[in-house]
Amino acid sequence: AQIIPTPQKRTFSTGQFAYTNALKISLYNDSQSKNLYTAELLNKTLKTLANLSVNLELNVKEAQIVLAIIDEKRALELNFPASKFKEAYRLTVKPERISIEAVNPQGILHGAITLIQLFEKATNNTIPAQ
């Protein structure tokens, strides 16, 4: 099944992210809580979609999902196209954590929409590492 819009680049890793019905989400490097809307969207959507409870966690190390605002230097290191900083994001799924990195909240929102699609396609409460 296809992810919409199609990611510019998709790389798969070994392992999978296994989840229970309660997840913790953290906003990293977001002092003004600009990603709170996206965290709430994930909570409502995942509750409806898969009966998951997503709670805000202040300690990033305790969270299973991290929404991280990054600076332009880091974005360039990740090969974000400079002309697309506003929309670009990096979604990483590892066995221990899912992270979405973007320069601004619009990119975080785009990453969250992709993440929701991965939860829709999940089997046995797991998402392949990527």
Image: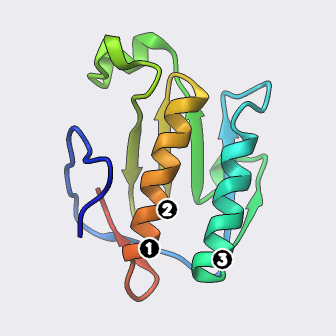
Give residue 33's mark. none
Residue at 31% in and 18% down: 77
**Mark sitting earlier along the chain (3/2):** 3
- 1 with respect to 62 (left or right): left
Residue 40 higher or lower than 89, as above or below: below
- 76 with respect to 28 (left or right): left
Label 1 crowd (10 A; few <14 / some 14-19 / many >=20): few
The reply to whether callout 3 and callout 2 are in contact (CB within 8 Å) is no
The reply to whether callout 2 and callout 1 are in contact (CB within 8 Å) is yes
Instruction: Find residue 24 and report its image quarter.
Output: bottom right
Residue under pointer 1: 120
| Residue 62 in view here | no
**Mark sitting earlier along the chain (3/1):** 3
Kind of residue at badge 2: Ile
The reply to whether callout 3 and callout 1 are in contact (CB within 8 Å) is no
Residue under pointer 3: 48
Q: CA distance from mark 3 to mark 1?
A: 11 Å
Q: Quadrant of the N terminus?
A: bottom left
